[in-house]
Image: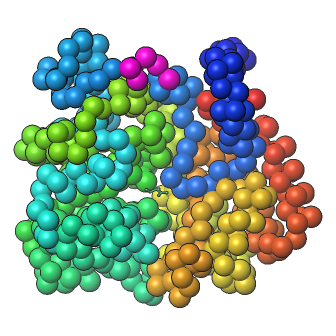
């Protein structure tokens, strides 16, 4: 509302007088986030409450260690904040133990490896070009350099996870750890099946639920918690919290995980982020958030229908979560030029490899779409159908600058009716 807008303006007044360049850039980024349809599958709009928590004096405090066992004095308040964040995360996800200190998803994943693996140990994760993450064993990442990283592919015909093939591969390479989870897989993962495979070859099971954590919290997606030894997640994607991460695990691994995060990987936690996480977990622990999570999935289905009706080829033929992977080459365009044209038109996506992509990673066949951010600004069926129409119009004529300018103007005007959380312009 208006009062929130005024409050935010007042907060930014000090930036304006101290550093007009950064002030202008922040305002421009606010406007960009307001005026454009953000379909980046890993992004969202946090609430004003989460935003405010990140901009507090909590950023001033060092607190290496854990509540009751810190290496600096003055932790009377910080201990309470971190404990609140942990308790809320435990309740929200039904986890036995939670560490909320990882700076982001990549350090969280590496902390898990540090807790359980030695350099050279074998890990088995989803291949990066098939939707896995860099830290699931990609050769350019520390996870691929320090460990013997084997990767599983998706099924060539269906684009789906091939559990029988993973089982065979696991029994043959005997990984110390199997990693489930993804950055670009549009379907639900069978965590129980992964558990069985891990048990059969004596591996630990880690699930990286970063993309779908909000759907798990909102009961719109199965939870990996009962099946995995360790679950990692960022907090800023579908979960709609601040940029950060956490590790959830069984109590028997609590000491190993905590030691790996601090002092293994990190120094002082970012307390302003921890507080904002606590706020986000409170926001996620109610019926409104369940409605949000259901709507994210519903919007994914609607967008998938609209894309298919417009002649696009969706990897796996659809989606069960917030994410769509679209092969745009049927429209005689590559993923990168498609993404660039969409951005100019006011629809922000990323170009993305598709499984067994015949094109190079720098210029792949696909684009990735996600519905978490637009659902936060109130998009439903009608809006998602319209988004599909716009995407088709742009990708059908990516060089038509006149058309793209017209669509950009239409989208900016359309977006005025859907103010996102945290931004008032
Ligand atoms: N960068 C995130 C994503 O876009 O999926 C994953 O790390």
Residue 405, compared with residue 338, is above or below; it is above
Q: Which residues are magenta?
A: 55-60
The structure residue drawn at horizontal position 19% and vertical position 57%, both measured from the top left corner, is 113
Q: Is residue 302 visible?
A: no
Quarter of image, res 98: top left
Position of the C terminus, as image quadrant, is top right
Q: Position of residue 397 (x, y in %)?
A: 83, 74
Q: Position of residue 12 (x, y in %)?
A: 65, 21
Residue 363, compared with residue 16, is above or below; it is below
Residue 169, compared with residue 424, is above or below; it is below
How many marks are shown on the rendered structure? 0
Q: Determine whether, in the image, residue 183 is placed left or right of residue 329.
A: left
Q: Position of residue 233 (x, y in %)?
A: 34, 48
Position of the N terminus, as image quadrant, is top right
Residue 57, compared with residue 375, is above or below; it is above
Q: Is residue 261 visible?
A: yes
Judging depth in this view, the residue of 350 and 249 nearest the camera is: 350
Q: Position of residue 194 (x, y in %)?
A: 23, 67
Q: How is the image coloured?
A: rainbow
Main secondary structure of the magenta stretch: helix
Query: Does 57 appear in magenta?
Result: yes
Q: Determine whether, in the image, residue 166 is placed left or right of residue 312.
A: left
Judging depth in this view, the residue of 13 and 196 nearest the camera is: 13
Quarter of image, res 85: top left
Q: Residue furthest right?
A: 402
The structure residue drawn at horizontal position 43% and vertical position 62%, both measured from the top left corner, is 183
The structure residue drawn at horizontal position 48% and vertical position 58%, both measured from the top left corner, is 321
């Amino acid at each position: 509302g208006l009062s929130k807008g005024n409050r935010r303006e007042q907060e930014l007044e000090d930036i304006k007088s101290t550093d007009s360049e950064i002030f202008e850039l922040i305002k421009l980024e606010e406007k960009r986030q307001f005026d454009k349809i953000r379909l980046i599958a890993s992004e969202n709009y946090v609430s004003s409450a989460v935003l405010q928590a990140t901009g507090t004096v909590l950023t001033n405090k060092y607190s290496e260690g854990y509540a009751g066992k810190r290496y600096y004095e003055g932790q009377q308040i910080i201990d309470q904040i971190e404990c609140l964040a942990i308790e809320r995360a435990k309740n929200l996800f039904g986890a036995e133990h939670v560490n909320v200190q990882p700076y982001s998803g990549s350090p969280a994943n590496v902390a898990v490896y540090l807790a359980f693996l030695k350099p050279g140990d074998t890990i088995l994760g989803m291949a990066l070009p098939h939707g896995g993450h860099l830290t699931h064993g990609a050769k350019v990442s520390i996870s691929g350099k320090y460990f013997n990283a084997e990767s599983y592919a998706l099924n060539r015909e269906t684009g789906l996870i091939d559990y029988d093939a993973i089982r065979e591969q696991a029994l043959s390479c005997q990984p110390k750890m199997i990693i489930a989870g993804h950055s670009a897989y549009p379907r639900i993962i069978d965590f129980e099946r992964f558990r069985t495979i891990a048990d059969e070859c004596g591996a630990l099971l880690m699930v990286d639920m970063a993309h779908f954590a909000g759907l798990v919290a909102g009961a719109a997606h199965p939870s990996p918690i009962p099946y995995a030894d360790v679950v990692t997640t960022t907090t800023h994607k579908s979960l709609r919290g601040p940029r950060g991460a956490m590790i959830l695990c069984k109590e028997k691994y609590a000491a190993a995980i905590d030691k790996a995060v601090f002092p293994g990987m990190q120094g002082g936690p970012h307390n302003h982020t921890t507080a904002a996480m606590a706020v986000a977990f409170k926001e996620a622990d109610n019926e409104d958030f369940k409605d949000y999570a259901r709507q994210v999935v519903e919007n994914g289905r609607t967008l998938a229908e609209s894309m298919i009706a417009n002649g696009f080829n969706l990897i796996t033929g659809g989606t069960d979560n917030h994410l769509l992977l679209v092969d745009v080459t049927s429209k005689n365009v590559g993923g990168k030029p498609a993404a660039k044209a969409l951005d100019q038109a006011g629809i922000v996506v990323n170009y993305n490899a598709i499984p067994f992509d015949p094109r190079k990673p720098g210029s792949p066949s696909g684009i990735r779409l996600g519905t978490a951010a637009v659902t936060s600004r109130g998009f439903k069926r009608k809006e998602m159908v319209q988004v599909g129409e716009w995407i088709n119009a742009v990708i059908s004529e990516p060089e038509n600058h006149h058309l793209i300018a017209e669509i950009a103007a239409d989208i900016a005007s359309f977006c005025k009716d859907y103010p996102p959380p945290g931004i008032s312009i």
